[in-house]
Amino acid sequence: MKYLLANLVLLASFLSHNGTLKEIDKGYGIGDYATDFSLPDINGKKVSLADFKDAKGYLVIFTCNTCPYSIAYEDRIIALDKKYKTKGVPVIAINPNDPDLQPADDVQHMKKRAMEKGFTFPYLVDEKQEIFPQYGATKTPHVYLLEKTKNGNVVRYIGTIDDNYSDASSVKTRYVENAVDAMLSGEEIPLTTTRAIGCSIKSRK
């Protein structure tokens, strides 16, 4: 009996720290090193962070075709890419949704959306739904700013794009822009985490 109780305590401790196989990992925190990935874009070409040889960092954004919040932020995501890609911080967009649960988030709809909006950045598919849990993304959109260093890609900001998803003209605080500007200037980022505002990621069980 004592042996059984001891094992149950060990199992409970393991699960509290590691979660179940189906449970989403808590993901990265500020200062963690984010591992690279290799995901297909809308044309089937594999894309990795390492492909961007001259990058100083990356804006990894989990987004999709269908979420109203993602749609509201599309033009701003394009603007972020145009503004910072030339400064060495490109946008890398990843669709984490399971198309069986959200059919309009399949590759064909992604391709159509990218063409309609004129996406200037890679739009990747998290086919096996392995990358978004690794990052800890829970919403679309959910932003991760990574700084490329000699030791790896360091997480510098996690959260939302700005303080007004519904009206770009009424934005008062541009969290992502403030974070990227500070990172590129070698200054302390004023706010490193904010609460991501958006739709829950559609994950298969």
Image (spheres, grey):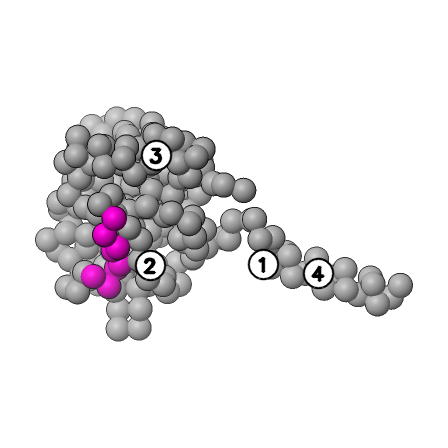
Could you tell me residue 52's position as x and y percent?
A: 18, 60
- Ranked by sequence position, the earlier of labels 1 and 4 is 4
- Ranked by sequence position, the earlier of labels 2 and 4 is 4
Q: Quadrant of residue 76?
A: top left
Mark 3–mark 1 CB contact (< 8 Å): no
Distance (Cα) linking label 2 and label 4: 31 Å
Quadrant of the image containing the N terminus: bottom right
Where disc 3 sits, the SS reads: helix
Quadrant of the image containing the C terminus: top right
> Is 107 colored magenta in this rendering?
no
For the point 28% across and 32% down, the residue is 109
- Ranked by sequence position, the earlier of labels 4 and 3 is 4
Could you tell me residue 89's position as x and y percent?
A: 19, 55
Q: Which residue is mark 2?
A: 37
Instruction: Using the image as rendered, state which of residue 32 and residue 53 is in the foreground.
Output: 53
For disc 1, the neighbor class at 10 Å (few under 14, some 14 to 19, many from 20) is: few
Could you tell me residue 75's position as x and y percent?
A: 19, 34
Q: Which residue is mark 1?
A: 18
Q: Which residue is mark 3?
A: 105
Read off the magenta span: 44-51
- Ranked by sequence position, the earlier of labels 1 and 2 is 1
In the rendering, which numbered label is found on residue 89? none
Q: Which residue is mark 4?
A: 11
In this view, 170 is above or below 191: above
Distance (Cα) linking label 1 and label 2: 22 Å
Mark 2–mark 3 CB contact (< 8 Å): no
